[in-house]
Image (tube, rainbow, N blue to C red):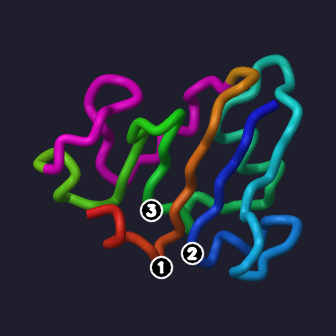
Amino acid sequence: MVEVYLYGKLRRYAPDPRPDRESVVRLEVRPGDTVETVLERLGIRPEEVAHLFLNGALLSTCNSMAPWLRYQAARGEVPACEPAWDTPVSDGDRLGIFGRDMALLVV
């Protein structure tokens, strides 16, 4: 199972998008699943995403300040505004997805 935490306007993809509810979607991991396939299953388009976190580490961001903020990177250097869609997901992983409306909140 992968847990997908949704923030900002992306909460609308949660089972109950109300702000006083948990905005987490839990999906069974399928063989070969990647960040891209998980987001496709949720109906989230790439242009809606500003920041991706995998297990608490920054996977990708559209914030140019990220390198100076010294976030723990999920893999190597954090690509600037190029979502790491090809990153595999495994059972027990957590994805944190921030929408474009929350691009500055990670700073």
Image-based side of 40 in relation to 105, left or right: right
Q: State the SS at label 2.
A: helix
Q: Mark 2 is on which residue type?
A: Gly
Q: Is residue 76 magenta?
A: yes
The residue under label 1 is 101
Q: Mark 3 is on which residue type?
A: Ala
Q: Nearer the viewer, mark 2 or mark 3?
A: 2
Q: Mark 1 is on which residue type?
A: Asp
The residue under label 2 is 8
Q: Nearer the viewer, residue 25 or 43?
A: 25
Q: Is mark 2 in CB contact (under 8 Å) with mark 1?
A: yes
| Mark-to-mark CA distance, 2 and 3 | 10 Å
Q: Residue furthest left?
A: 68
Q: State the SS at label 1.
A: helix
Q: State the SS at label 3.
A: strand
Quarter of the image with the C terminus in it: bottom left
Image-based side of 42 in relation to 57, left or right: right
Tell me which residue sits at (17%, 50%) in the image. Answer: 69
Tell me which residue sits at (62%, 24%) in the image. Answer: 88
The number of discs equals 3
Q: Position of residue 80 (x, y in %)?
A: 30, 49
Read off the magenta span: 69-89
Q: Nearer the viewer, residue 95 or 33?
A: 95
Tell me which residue sits at (47%, 39%) in the image. Answer: 56
Upstream in sequence: badge 1 or badge 3 = 3
Q: Is mark 1 in CB contact (under 8 Å) with mark 3?
A: yes
**Numbered badge on residue 90:** none
Q: Position of residue 18 (x, y in %)?
A: 77, 81
**Numbered badge on residue 50:** 3
Q: Position of residue 23 (x, y in %)?
A: 72, 64
